[in-house]
Amino acid sequence: MLQPVLKALLRLMFRLVFRVRVHGNPDIRADRLLIVANHESFLDELLLGLFLPQRPVIVVYASATHNRLFRFFALGLVDYLAIDPNNPLELKAVIRLLETGRPVLIFPEGRVTTTGNLMKTYDGPGFIAAKAGATILPVRIEGAARSHFSLVKGRFPRTLFPRIRLFVQEPTRIENEKVSHSEQHHLAAESMHRVMTGLMFAGRSEQTLYAALLEAARLQGRNWRFLGDVERVDYSYNDLLRSALIFGRKLDARLAKDERAGLLLPNSASLLALLFGLSAFRHPPVLLNPAADCELLRTGAAGAGLRTIITTRSLTTQPGFAAKLAALGGIELILIEDLHETVSLGDHLWWLLWAKARARHVVPQGRPEDPALVMFTAGSGSRCKGVVLSHRAILSNVSQLRSVLDFSSNDVIINALPLNSPFGLTCGALIPLLCGARLFLYPSAQHYRVIPEMSYTAPCSILFGSNTFLAHYGENARPFDLHGLRYVIAGTAPVSDTVRQLWFEKFGVRIFEGYGTAETAPVISINTPMACRLGSVGQFLPSLRHRLMPLAGVVPIHGGRCGQLHVAGPNLMDGYLAGMDTPPAATAIPDEAGWHDTGDIVEIDPDGFVYLRGRARLELRLGDSQVCLGVLEMILDENRPAGRHAVVSDEATPPSLTVFSTDPMLDHEAAMAHFGAAGLTPPPEAIKVVTIDEIPLETASNKPDYGILRRNTELINGQTSHSG
Amino acid sequence: MSAAKRIGLIVLRVICRLLFRIEVRGNVRVDTSKLLIIANHESFLDGLLLGITLPYSPVFVVHTGTERSAFFRLILRAVDHLSVDPTSPMAMKSVIRLINSGRPVVIFPEGRITTTGSLMKTYDGPAFVAARTGATLLPVRIDGASRTYFSRLSDHQPRQLFPRITISVQPATRIEWPTEGTARERRRRAGEAMRRLMQEMIFASRPRQTLYEAMLTAISIHGRSWRLVEDIKQIEYSYGDLLKMTLALGRLVSRKCAPGERVGVLLPNLAPTLGLIFGLSAFRRVPAMMNYTSGAEGMLAACEAASLKRVVSSRAFIEQAKLEDKVAALAAQHEIIYLEDLRGEMTAWDKAWLMLWALRFPGLAVPASDAEEPAAVLFTSGSEGKPKGVVLSHRAILANIQQARAVIDFSCEDKLLNALPLFHSFGLTAGGLLPVISGANVFLYTSPLHYRVIPELVYDRNCTILLGTSTFLSNYAKHAHPYDFYRLRYVIAGAEKLTQTVRANWFEKFGIRILEGYGATECAPVLAVNTRMAYRTGSVGQLLPGMKAKLVPVPGVEVGGALHVSGPNIMSGYLRAENPGVLEPPSSEVGKGWYATGDIVDIDADGYLYIVGRLKRFAKVAGEMISLEVVERLANQASDKGIHAATSQPDAARGENILLYTTDKSLTRDQLQAAAKASGSPEIAVPRKIIVVEELPVLGSGKTDYVTLKQWAETA
């Protein structure tokens, strides 16, 4: 009698002090309903007991009920069942309870998070769900970790009454597949873990980059000094916002409506401020690479329809840079130093008296679907494409990554990867910025001695790099320099065994390898502490869909499925800048309705780990069979790992192929044998094998330079015909 | 120096001496013509402390970064200093010039104030300076300054307004400029020498105490309310609780026995066991840690060797561990004291003594004793015969703890999971006594064999350090979730060789590099360990500071030699069953005070130890010495599925035959032959017979029981 009244009162109180809001439809009724939630604080039981209409029985772990306070306050008003998670018999009790028709709520993590992120999920809940064939209703609790009832350690922003939101997801199920018992147990646990990571991602809010920055500043405190660069080490969120707004407003006055502006700057806080400022005022910044060559800069700027580029004096005075600027021609250059000088007392007053308090309202209203910025894919010449990324795409990728990696404001990150590369921007700047981690932006990744030394003094806990950079850092660092490292994340190129071995031997650090493309803003898959397999690039991020286009000649080597990878998901780009020299307005959409062809040949093993096998390029009809040149290269690379190989086509009639190899042992016969073993039977006369000392490489991407090779082929063919 | 400055200095000296009760140890009078003083860096006060306690008025070499702070610029104005960038070789040249000019120079080779409380990395620069100038090197250890509010330790570490500070000046020394290798290589070598020197310094400046005194020191640092010991009952005991247990148990048990008497302890890993160990040793009784997995015969042999009259145990434990028969056998000749009965024996007078006197003045409540007196008796695992009693003095145990702390940073923020039994030397020293003495938290778990429970406990109790053997770690990895070990900082493996599969598994699944160590009960027990700063796969690390090693060539063995060691952590001596109650001090063919480990060891140019094999685990086949460990390695190469153990049996024609026991049913001699060919091992190392068994015999410590195996082989 008393209970409903008390509950209603409490509900009202919670609505008032924690401003609890329920998103989604919680009123799901099913015969066997299992509600799962992440576990942020000791309030969670009561919270869900009050706000879920099903009045579920809450499963708690026996050890938690020893605490009298907890039993009284959190469990006093709800029905609960205390179990030991490692005891199979007690799991059966939960299944029986489900079968009686009572909805059951379970926290698959089993304990209140100490990292602010998803912890491990126990096998039990997955097993229960599969065994009972229950409908699963995932609920994300967000905000309770910031109350004083949580267990998150270290510098974590807490308030007395944080805003708490409950996100109710679409109901789902875990299929009870017909496999062996232990296998089934394992699969169910895996599926439950996927439901939980999906849950952590799904709670994200749709917003713009600028709004996300404001929210991070609100959560972490506007005065949290988290950002540093070579000039200053202690910018706060307020400093960043001030620069972003003042610069943004000034540039907005100079640019036409929705006009893009180029940013040609090394890693610095100013670059970050301009990026946020411009995108907030609806001028998507175009991130240009100061290291790119003249041709690239010119086509890039033209393709994006740039009339204004912001750069810095230190760059313009660099030798050789004048030529690049000359190539740009006709484009107005604004020096950031000049921009600084135009900041007047009026601007400062505007910020102090007006914009600081109304930061949300002094910029035009943006939509998450609007383009946020433009980046360029790696590569040179015409193959380098401009990619338009929306706010939604970038923030989705940030949320996807945060749902699998526990970055927090206790971390210190040194980012030397350029912010104009997708990996450097999303992982190396936006994630730290949005989760409040301390971030130091360093302008050059090639200062191999300085970076380990900095990481010793900081001490750095997260480091990003490519294989080459990590090799050099590892070489130059002393064993203790990297003692604070929690995560080393490598992208852009596969990590070699020597580098992995070096890092193990010297620092005892495991390198997490990831995989991504500029088109996916950028991460597609990544190894994490929860799921790591050396040699793979990890499992797909949550909410990312994929399909494999079968390719002839690709044989699985990890017992999985192979093919050319296509992906779709919330982090996909809006499209490419159509034709680099054509007017900028139109942007092409990704391949057929929201799918993007990565062009990579991958293998996905039964546990969902992705292995990169090669690049699919250029399909050709040879005799009766269709062959993909990339597959041929892959076959040779995998069978002859000592050498490097490149295959070039000659589209004369009949078409023929030339295989360039640095392996002198590879002759025509051996090559044909390798192709045959993979099930490919191109006509032998159409293939020529040439041994060369070195495959010419493109400097930008480290990939074979097919242009030079093709000219070589013509030369060789010319010679043979001549001698013949 | 101006008069004003001099007066200021004197005033400062008096104030600091009073506030921090600064004690200067060692001889400060050295030749100052070319003097380089190196010190560890504990706080912002260090420069000041050295300036007022050392009689040289030296020039301080400071990191350029220090000058950025306005506060420090102010302070630096008052002292002679030279600011350099420690990574720049040019900067070091200016320090060299300074030393050659004859001014004494102070350098902090760590370059920054410690954030871990232990030694951090040492830069190569100072070593380069020391070696190049041939300067006299004066190592100075600052101890206690890290507990002031001027240090950079994390907030959880204990602080005091004015802690007691000790400055220990070590004997002067030099670093030789290496003659071999490239310039870069030489720099690195000199840097390594400097790091060793600093570690030796940290170790050499340790206080001489008994276990009980060391515990009281720790209590004065961390406070009585610091909760640190937790056991299976999931109660966290504080220092206050532990002290109470120590005093009460010590008093009650010591009443029943004579001073200096050895008392058997037959108890599992629980907090009261720790209390009893401290209590007995505080009251000058020697706890003899009984191995309850060894069977009645082994326990009786142990009792005989140590000539025990009384054994302390617990009824609940005996019942749960099903030891009734064994204890009945013991009770025939020995008095069993049950902990449960002791509670009833506590009189009102005892309570008054405890509450009114002992807990208030713990330093005065126990009889005085000396660091050289025996603190504990442990028994060798008996893998090679009857168990021997190993008598360890307070000095030996505390030395080993300090040696370990000099190379690995344990702090009160760590939590150690100790499932190794306390009767095992590693379990006792590293898993029981070290946490109490360093203030680190410890969870005592009763059995290392609960492979599912232990990973779960590590996760649930937020443990940061795990101790184990290769076998145990392999099994933990098999049953653990990838996230269970996410907080672990150190996993230390000992007692048996760490296999490559286990190492690779742990790295791939958990991202943890297992640090392999090497020890012997006789060395209390750690001899060498890999650390974060000095790690090499396949080795067992460098020798601990303060230890000396000699390799004695063994005929028939080409690589390495028999390892003999000496150092402050060596036992007082053996107690043998053949000669009950008589202490046999350590001595080996190298000399008195040396201990022959019985292992064949190779030491590389950088001082890393590689275990070649156990001297006794060689079989003489047709005149050739074949290491049985090589045979096992071959078996592991041929099949990584099962567990393999090799042993030998006498053979009339060939001297001895090698036998391989395995749990892998599919293993054949052909596979072994192929493995031998692949690894270049002699054909003769391939075992004669392969015998498949369900399970190999294992000792309580997780090692293979080779005595039983040998018995099997004799009848095979």
Image (cartoon, rainbow, N blue to C red):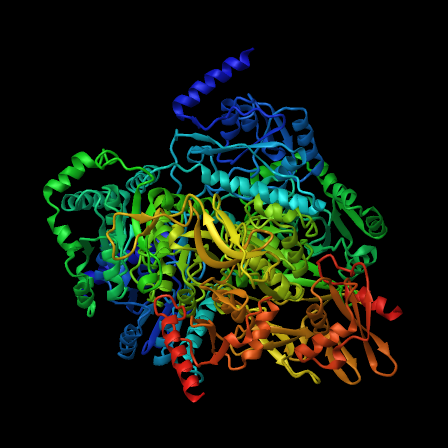
Q: Residue A194 location in percent, x, y?
A: 54, 43
In which quadrant of the rendered view does residue B348 lie?
A: top right
Q: Residue A164 location in percent, x, y?
A: 42, 30
Q: Quadrant of the N terminus of chain B?
A: bottom left
Comparing A719 with A30, the one in front is A719
Comparing B597 with B495, the one in front is B495
In the image, residue B361 above or below residue B601: above
Left-right relation of A319 to A436: left
The residue under the point 39% across, 74% down is A710
Residue found at the far top of this picture: A1
In which quadrant of the rendered view does residue B691 lie?
A: bottom right
The residue under the point 70% across, 72% down is B634
Residue found at the far front of this picture: A653
Q: Residue A637 location in percent, x, y?
A: 52, 70
Comparing B59 with B556, the one in front is B556
In the image, residue A142 above or below residue A521: above
The residue under the point 73% across, 73% down is B631
Residue B595 appears in the rendering: no
Residue found at the far bottom of this picture: A723
The residue under the point 51% across, 75% down is A687
